[in-house]
C-alpha cells in the first residue's frame, strides 16, 4: 500500500514537471512565441502609423491656419490704403465720387464768397476755398464714418449672439445671417444683408466677411472676418468660436466705457486749456478793439500769430494723445 502511494506521488510530480515544461518550452518550438512577437510588432507598427497620421493631420491643420492668417493679414494691409470710394462706403453714403467732388466744389465756392465779403485779400479767399473744398468734406466724411462705426459696434455683439444660437439650434450659417438682417437695427442689418446677398451670388463666406470688414473699419469686424475665414478654411466649432468672440467684444466695450469715465476729467481739462487762449483773445478784442490790431496789420504781429497757431496745434495734439487710449 505504501509503495503504491509513492508511485502515485512520483507520477504526479512527473506530470507537474512535464506540464511546466510543456507550457514554458513548447511555445518556443511550436512557433506560437514567434506569432505573438509578430502580432506585437504589427500592433506597434499600426500604433506608430496611427500616431504619424495624427501628427500629419495636426501639421496640415496648423499649416491651413497659418495660411489663412497670412492671407487675412495680406488683405488687411491692402485695406489700410483708404481711397475716397472706400471712405464714402464706410460713411454709409449712397453717392458717387463725382457727386462728392461736386458738393466739395460748391462748398469751396461758398466759403470763398464768405471770405470775400469780409476781406479783399486774395490769399484769404484761396484759403477759404481750400477749407470749404477740402477740409470740410474730409471732416464730414470722418464724422459720418465714426458715427456709423459706433452704431454698428453697439449692436454687433447681439448679432453674433443670434448667429451662435442659430448655429447651435442646427440652422445653417446663411440662414442665421438672414435672421440678423431681418431682426437687428441698422447699420448691422444692412451689412449682414449685403453679406447674405454676396454669399447668394457666388462669393465664398471668407470673401463675403472680408468685404464686410472693408465696409466697417473696426477691429471687431476684422476679428469676425478672421474667425469665419479660419473656420471655413480649416474647420472647427463655429458656435464656440463666435461665443468667445462675443464675450471678448462685450469685455472690450466695458473696458472702453471704464476708460472713458476715468478720462472724462482729463478731457474736460484739455478742452478748457485749449479753448482758454481763444476765449481770452476774443474777450480782449471785444472789450478793446484797437488793442490787438497790430497782430493783424503788421508783419511782426502776423508772424507771432502764426507761431502761436503752430504751438497751439502742437499742444492740442499732445493733449489729445495723452487722453486717448486704444483698447
Image (cartoon, rainbow, N blue to C red):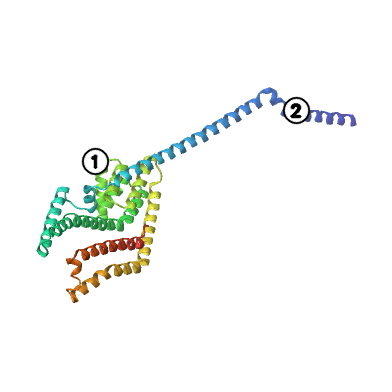
The residue positioned 40% from the left and 39% from the top of the image is: 64
**Closer to us: mark 1 or mark 2?**
1
Quadrant in which residue 304 is drawn: bottom left
Quarter of the picture containing the C terminus is bottom left
User: With respect to residue 99, does 309 lie above or below?
Assistant: below
What is the spatial separation of the Cα atoms under label 1 and label 2, in whole angstroms? 80 Å
Q: Which mark is residue 21?
A: 2
Q: Position of residue 51 (x, y in %)?
A: 52, 35
Quadrant in which residue 110 is drawn: bottom left
Residue 11 left/right relative to 203: right
Say which of 151 and 299 sits in front.
299
Say which of 247 and 94 sits in front.
94
User: With respect to residue 301, does 218 lie above or below?
Assistant: above
User: With respect to residue 122, does 288 lie above or below?
Assistant: below
Mark before the other along the chain sequence, 1 or 2:
2
SS of the residue under disc 1: loop
Name of the residue lying farthest toward the bottom: 287
Say which of 5 and 38 sits in front.
38
Residue 193 left/right relative to 256: left
Q: Position of residue 194 (x, y in %)?
A: 24, 47
SS of the residue under disc 2: helix
The residue positioned 40% from the left and 50% from the top of the image is: 240
Residue 242 left/right relative to 91: right
Q: Position of residue 42 (x, y in %)?
A: 57, 29
The residue identified by callout 1 is 201
Q: Position of residue 99 (x, y in %)?
A: 14, 50
Amino acid at each position: 500500500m505504501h509503495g503504491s502511494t509513492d508511485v502515485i506521488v512520483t507520477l504526479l510530480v512527473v506530470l507537474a514537471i512535464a506540464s511546466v515544461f510543456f507550457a514554458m518550452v513548447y511555445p518556443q518550438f511550436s512557433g506560437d512565441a514567434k506569432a505573438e512577437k509578430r502580432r506585437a510588432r504589427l500592433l506597434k507598427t499600426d500604433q506608430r502609423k496611427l500616431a504619424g497620421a495624427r501628427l500629419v493631420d495636426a501639421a496640415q491643420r496648423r499649416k491651413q491656419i497659418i495660411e489663412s492668417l497670412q492671407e487675412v493679414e495680406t488683405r488687411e494691409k491692402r485695406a489700410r490704403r483708404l481711397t475716397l470710394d472706400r471712405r464714402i462706403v464706410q460713411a454709409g453714403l449712397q453717392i458717387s465720387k463725382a457727386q462728392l467732388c461736386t458738393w466739395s466744389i460748391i462748398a469751396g465756392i461758398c466759403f470763398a464768397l464768405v471770405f470775400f465779403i469780409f476781406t479783399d485779400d486774395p490769399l484769404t479767399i484761396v484759403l477759404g476755398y481750400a477749407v470749404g473744398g477740402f477740409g470740410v468734406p474730409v471732416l464730414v466724411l470722418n464724422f459720418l464714418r465714426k458715427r456709423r462705426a459706433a452704431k454698428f459696434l453697439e449692436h454687433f455683439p447681439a448679432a453674433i449672439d443670434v448667429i451662435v444660437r442659430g448655429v447651435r439650434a442646427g440652422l445653417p450659417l446663411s440662414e442665421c445671417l438672414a435672421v440678423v438682417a431681418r431682426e437687428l437695427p441698422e447699420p448691422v442689418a444692412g451689412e449682414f444683408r449685403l453679406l447674405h446677398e454676396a454669399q447668394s451670388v457666388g462669393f465664398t463666406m471668407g470673401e463675403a466677411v472680408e468685404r464686410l470688414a472693408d465696409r466697417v473699419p473696426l477691429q471687431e469686424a476684422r476679428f469676425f472676418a478672421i474667425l469665419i475665414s479660419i473656420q471655413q478654411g480649416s474647420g472647427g466649432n463655429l458656435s464656440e468660436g463666435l461665443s468667445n468672440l462675443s464675450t471678448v467684444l462685450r469685455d472690450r466695450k466695458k473696458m472702453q466705457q471704464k476708460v472713458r469715465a476715468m478720462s472724462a476729467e482729463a478731457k474736460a481739462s484739455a478742452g478748457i486749456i485749449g479753448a482758454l487762449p481763444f476765449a481770452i483773445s476774443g474777450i480782449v478784442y471785444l472789450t478793446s478793439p484797437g488793442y490787438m490790431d497790430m497782430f493783424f496789420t503788421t508783419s511782426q504781429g502776423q508772424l507771432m500769430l502764426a507761431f502761436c497757431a503752430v504751438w497751439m496745434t502742437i499742444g492740442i495734439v499732445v493733449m489729445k494723445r495723452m487722453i486717448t487710449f486704444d483698447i
